[in-house]
Every structure is written in C-alpha cells, then in structure tokens.
Amino acid sequence: MALDETVCGSCGRFVGAYEKCPYCGATVSKRLSIKIFRYGSLILSIAGVLILYLISLKREIPLININEISPTMNFAYIRVRGIVVRYPLFDEKSGSLTIHINDGTDELILKAYRNVALKIKELNRIPKIGDIIDVEGNIRLRGSLKTLTINVPEKVKIIESPVIEIDLNNISDDFLNKKIKSSGIVSDLRFYKNYISLFIKDRKGKNKVRVPINLNQFNEKLPELNIGDEIQVEGLLSYYSKNYNILISSASNIKKISKKPIVFSLAIENVTKNDLNRIVSIKGEIKKIRKFSKGIELTVNDGSGNISVVLWNNIYEKIKEKDSINEGVLVSVVGKVGLYKNKLQIVPALPQNFNIVKKEVKKSEKIIEKKIGEINEDDKGSILKIEGEVESYFNFSKGRRLTLNDGTGSIDIILWNDLLNELEDAEYIIKGSRISVKGKVSEYKNKLEIIPKYTSDIEVKELNKNLSPRNLESK
Amino acid sequence: MNFLNFIIYSFAGVLIASIVSLIPALHVYNIAGLIILISLNYKNLIPSEYLPVFMMSMIVTYSFLNIIPSIFLGAPDDSTIFVVLPGQKYMLEGRGFEAVVVSNIGSLVGIIFLFISTPFLFVFLPKIGKILTPHMFWILTLILVYMILSEWPKGMERAKTRLGNFWDAWKSLLAGILTLILSGFLGIIIFNKSLLPLDISFQNIMPAFVGLFAVPWIITNILSKVKIPKQYICKTVDLNFNLIMRGGVAGFLGGMFAAFFPVVTGGIGGLLAGHATAQRDERIFVLSQGVSKTVYYVGAFLLFFVPSLNVTRGGLAWMISPFYTPHTINDYLIALGTMLFAAGLSFLITFAYSKFVIKIVEKIDYTIISYFVLAFIVLLVFYLTGFMGILIMLVSTMIGLIPVMFNSRRMNCLGILLIPIILNMSGLGPKVALFLGLIK
C-alpha cells in the first residue's frame, strides 16, 4: 500500500499531493520535499519560461540554403532568400498564396493561408516573377515536396533583382533563374485564350527565345506586336519545352524598339536556304492555289521566280479578304522562311502578314508571243500575241469570227462589232490575209479563242486583194 | 511488397513498441524519432515502403500496451490521464489486471470500429473536413474554453477566513490556468524560434512534451513511493455487450474527434466524449478510454493513408511524412491490413505482458525503476536534442509539475500546442510574436 504523505493517515486512502484528504477531510502532513516541489515548480516554471524567452530574443532566425533542408528539419523556423521563378498564385477561393522560389541551390514552395495570405496581399507584398524574396517560416516536408509556411506577413521582404543585359546569342544555362534584359526580332506570335506565345530571334534569324505571356497576370495593355518588330524584353530566364524562356512580370517588360517591323524584303529568286527561319517580305502574283487539310499553299511569282506561301487554316480563316485569294491576284507576304520536302516556303504567322495588293491583274501588262500550236489551257486569261493566215471567217450578228492558222495550229479570233466598225482594214481581214493579233485568251464551248480589245491589237501584215468581203457571204 | 518482409517489419514494430510501452513515461513518438534518425544513417534498415508497416505496428501495439504502465507504474502520457484515477482505483483494489483487460477490450473495439469506418473515412470525412476546415479556429477555441470552464473548484479545506476558503477552492483552478498560460507561452516561443539544432527540428516539441508529461510523473512516483498491492489475475471481466457498445461509441467519438482535429489529443477527445455521452459507470469509463486512445493514436495515423483526405494528423504521421507519401488506395489497404495484424498480436500479448509487469513490480522497488527511466529519458533527450533540449525539458517539467502538485488537470499542459495554433489560425499569432519581440 501507499506510504507516508501520499496516503491519508486517517482513512488510509491514496491522496497524492492533497494536504486534506478528499475522502475523510483529515489533514495529511506533508514532507518538505512535496512542498518544495509544489512551490518550487511554480517559481521555477515562471523563471524557466522567462529564461527561454530571453534566450529566444537573442536568437537570430538562421538563413538556410534550400538544398540544405533535410527531412529531419521538418517544422524548423528558418529564413530563406531566393528568386521567384514562377508566377505567384493567389487563390481567392481558398485564400491561399503559393510562390515558387529558387536560391540557386534548389527550389522551394512558399505557402501562406487565409489571414496571412490576405494580409500579404493587403501589404502589397506579393512578389512578381523575377523578384528576390526574403522570407521566414516553418518548413513542411511531405515526401519530396518542400514547402515553407509563412506565418508572419511582415517577414516577407521583396528585393528588386539586378538585371543582366545580354545578347540573345549569349544566353546560356549560366543565366537561368536570373533576371535578364535582351532584344530581338519577333519571329512568331501564337495566340491562345488568355495566353500569347511570342518568339524572338536575333537579326540573323537564330537563337530563338520564347516569351510566354499570360494575359491573366497583367492589367496593363501589351504593346501591339507584329512579326518583325524589334523588341526589348526584361524578365526571368528559364528553360522549358526545349526553349529558353523569358518570363516577364508586367506588360511594361516588353518594349518596342523599332517603329517599323524589321523585315528583309527580297526578290523571290534571292530567297535561298541561307534565309531559313528569317523573316522576309515578298510581293508577287498568285500562280497556283492548292488546298490541303490544314491550310492552303499558294505558288507566288514575282517575275524572278516562284515560291510557296503556306497559310495554315488558323491564319487563312482570319484573313479579311480571303475570298479574293485567286490566281492572278497580286499579294505581299511577310513570313518565316521554311523548308519542306527540300522546297523553300514562306509561312506568315499572323493574318495581317498576308495582304492583297491588287485583286485583278491586267494580263496586257505582260504580252507573251506564242505559236498557235503552243497555246493551251494554261494560257487562259493571258494576253498573247500571235501571227497567222486567216483560214476562214464567219460574220454573225455581233461581229466576226476568224480562224487563224500559223502552220503550227489554228485558233479562233473574235472581233466584236464595236472593234470591227473602227478597224480601217476590216474589209481586208478575210481568208488568205495574214494578220497579227494581240488579245486575251478565253474559252467558248470548250474551244480556246483570242479576243482583241483595241484596234491597235490587230495588225494586217499581208492582204488578199483578190477577194472582196462584199462578194462573200461566208467562207 | 514482399509478404515475408511485411511480416518481419510488422513483428519488428510490435516488438519494439511492446518494449517501449513497458517503460513508464517513454512515449512511442520519442522512440519513433530515434528510429527515424538511425534509419537515415543506415539506409537499408527500414526501406521506405515498409516504414508505414513498421510504424503502424508500433503505434497499434503502443495504443494497446500503454495502459499497463498507466495502471501499474502510474506514468501515463496525456492520452491516458483519464484512466489514471479509475485505473489506479482498480490497481489499489488488486484489480489492475482486470482494468488492463477492460481497456484492452476497448482497444480492440476501437480497431474494429476503425476498420468498419473505412467507407466513412473515404466518403464522408473528406466532405466533413472541407466544411470544418475554415471553422477550425473557433472550434479549437471553444475546446480550449470548455477545457477551462469544465474544471470545478476542488477545495477541501475549512479555512478560518472566507478568503482562505476561496483560495483553497480556487488554487487548483488558478494553477491549471497558470499551467495553460505558461505552456502556451512556451509553445509560442518554440513555434516562433528554432531553439533546437535545425537538423532535429522534427522533434522540436519532444523535449517539451517529455518535460510536461513524462518527467513530472516519474518525479511524483519517486516522491510518492507507492507500493503495488497484491494483484488478482481474473478469469472473467464484468462487461456485457451493452456496456461494450456504450463505452465503444463514446470512446470512438472522442478518439475520432481527437484524431481528426489538429492539436486535439486523446485526452481532450476523451474528456469531450465522456461529457457528451455522460457515461458514469467506471467500467465504461475505462473501456471507453481504451477505445479512445487507440482510435486517437491509430486513427490519426490511418487518416494519413486516405488518399482523398490529404491530412496529416498525430505526431507519427508528421514524423514519417518527409520520408513517405501514400498515393493509392493500395497504400491504405496495406496500412489497414497491418493495423489488423498488429492489433490481433497486441491484444494477445497484452495479457502476458500485464502478468509479467505485475510480477516485476511486486518484486522490484518501483522507485528504482523510476530512477532508471528518468535517467534513460534524460539521456534520450540529450542525445536527440542536446543541451537546449535538456533546458526546454527542465522548464517544461516545472510547468508539468504544477498541475500534479496542485491537483489540477494535466491536460492544461496542452496549451503548448493549443494556444499557438489557435493564435495562428485566428491571425493573431504574428501580432503576439511581434509584440513579444520574437519577430523583429
């Protein structure tokens, strides 16, 4: 049974530290040791807590490298300093704030919840991507996930990162997770919902760098950008999806340097494989149109040569005058030079990079001399000049039809009455006469014919004076 | 997962926990921390996929067996403090073995309830968690207020003056409130400043807990010089299905409440469940506390494996979370299987262990055991946390002695967790820390 002062001397029950038995009310004498512990614990506990408090006041919060955080450091209250490497996320619904930082040794996720997150927002201490943040909090480790929970909004300090000015061709892994400033020419612009993927290159069309723009991140308006614009970009350098990326923190991080797009205007014959990935500008006439499932391919000719222009469906559908894209139309194209099946092509990245200069082209501007036997379906719409002997002719109500033969073949010539009436030698243009005709090739009842428009288009080379048209009603 | 390895690591967990459980005042969490540190140095000692198996076996066994030192060696942790009085009554009446059996049945009932509640854990608990999470702050505040208000004046003196009577009635309550304030203040310091070496931070609360709960009890035992009366080994227990169900439901509610709510321990859960279900029968009390502590310890750890819940509750889950992350329902099923396997073993060995301890305490001076345990705990704290850990343990011991010496609730020592967490959840934590100069 229990002994001494822990047992009631009167009833024999266990009373522990009671000085009065809770069962019978008898006084239980206590030895000094119990009394010492009773009051000693009071004094020493207060003194001890005060000592620990004073020690803690002297303690500095240790600044730790992220890679030094080990699993046994779970719950440690530490300080870290690193650059913000992803866009901070403030979730209004759950009231939580998530920030990813990297201190050059490793990456760490900072978390703040509810009141703390709201207070950080209120204090305007949510950092921007590329900012350096100095913060204190409790380490939380779960599997391979390292997080630091921010408890005190006031301990979030934002320090502006130094900006390294660098040429695009000097960008390397050494500058990863550092804030850089670089300039280049916009080579590609891809638009998504609330997101733009912008690519820049140097003037040689090399060293492609991506500038992803999340439109939800900014309130400011981005400058209007076009392919070929020379821009300066300031932001955090990262590597993602096989590309260096410059992550901007605000729209003002993109500045347009050139007033006009820097585009290399070239004659088609001068576009070579050396221009691959370069942005060039060409002007020419659409010679051929080929549709395929993902877009259309135009063969454009500027007199010096042919080149393919590929309009992907997403671009083609947004071209305002797309219905006017026909053969013979004069167009100007700005796009990146590419190579497909060893054939050069130009690919516009924006609808505005494809413009129709003239919807109809006067074929008379270019007169082609041909033998009649060489004329074929491809010449439809072309202005040809031919010479031959009138094989036969036929007058009808609106004019005269001649059949001209140059020894290589024959073709019909239509002379409308308005032309015929003005033509001085009209009466001599009969069978046996030799004439030269300039006119547009067209087709009637599956047969090609040439229609001169002006009196100057007909030149009588040799007359058959033995025959008078008045005496002849038909051939 | 290899079945043989599963058995080996389960047995290992049961074995180590059964040794730990017999050392009064030594907590399974202290040893778990030590094992984690050792296994970090010896990578192949416990492969990460068997870490949950080993730890689950340990926690299950501990939750069954820790009733033995609570009853025979009088050194409970915070989750068993409610068992002490009725348990010690049993022991002093020579019925300590019966109390162990009743509590053991309660633990088994708790395991069965946990197994049955699997659909609840997967389907309803995530939804309940989603609803309750934003309200945690005021729920915990209410619990704290309830803890304070539910303790009544205990004066026995018939003093000569009114003031004397008032002081006698209120001194234990005031001591309780002082304990709450001091432990809360200590918690604020520990949570805001890393006093321990950084690489042992996962054990930052350990020296404080040892000081608040373990050491005061060992000191009390040394001072009180209790001698264990002859114990009767019973063949039957005075329980029926009705009592088991009443105690089981009350205990499960308390245990689950403690397991699910952050910071709330088995002791607090037991208090709330006991009051809520108004169970006055001592048998139900002991049984429901057996259920409650098992559901609290094992349930909190089991929640860690529920994929859709994504919560970390209880010291053990927090300790292994940096080393192991459950991902699939398969991980939960392995944890569940380990729980059942270890529970079966633990239920059986509790009887043998109880008889063994009865023989030991009848033959060996309990004071000597207490001295050995005290020395071991001090060495463990020093090994794990160094001089600063010893200082924190000493200060905490002084705080932990206040409720023991003034007969107030030792549960007030949980202010070390409750107060800083409530302050942080309310958004007042940083302001208090700034005011105290802990944050500059």
Image: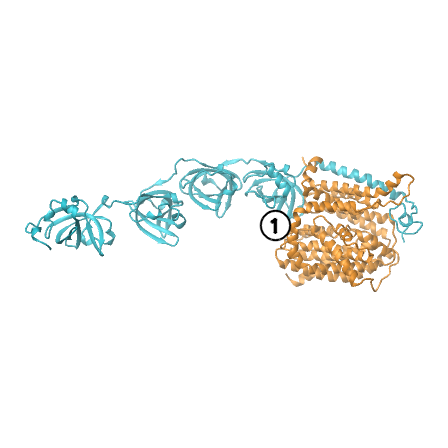
Compared across the picture, whether B362 is left or right of A289 comes to right
Is residue A33 shown left or right of residue B245?
right
Query: Mark 1 = which residue?
Result: A144
Asked which quadrant contains residue A262, the reply is top left
Whether residue A142 sits left or right of residue B254 in the image: it is left
Label 1 Cα crowd, 10 Å radius (few <14 / some 14-19 / many 20+): few
Residue B141 placement, left or right of A217: right
The answer to whether residue B378 of the structure is visible from this angle is: no
Q: Residue furthest right?
A: A10
**Residue at the image point whose x is 10% and y is 52% from the top:** A432
Instruction: Please tell me whether mark 1 sits on a helix, a strand or a loop.
Output: loop
Q: Using the image, name the chain to which the residue with label 1 belongs.
A: A
In the image, residue A156 lies at what x, y percent? Answer: 62, 38
Residue sitting at x 16%, y 43%: A456
Q: Relative to the observer, which residue lies in front, A280 or B2?
A: A280
Residue B110 location, x and y as percent? Answer: 74, 58
Res B4 → quadrant: bottom right
Furthest-left residue in view?
A466
> Chain A: what color?
cyan
Chain rendered orange: B
Quadrant containing the N terminus of chain B is bottom right
Please state which of residues A111 and A274 is positioned toward the viewer in this rendering. Answer: A111
Q: Which amino acid type is shown beneath numbered disc 1?
A: Ser
Task: Quadrant for residue B57, please give it.
Answer: bottom right
The quarter of the picture where the C terminus of chain B appears is: top right
Q: Of B72 and A286, which appears nearest the observer? A: A286
Residue A177 can be seen in this image: yes
Q: How is the image coloured?
A: by chain
Q: Position of residue B193 (x, y in %)?
A: 69, 40
Q: Could you say where residue B156 lies in the image, as x and y percent from the top left?
A: 88, 45
The residue sitting at the bottom extreme is B235
Residue at 8 percent of width and 53 percent of height:
A472
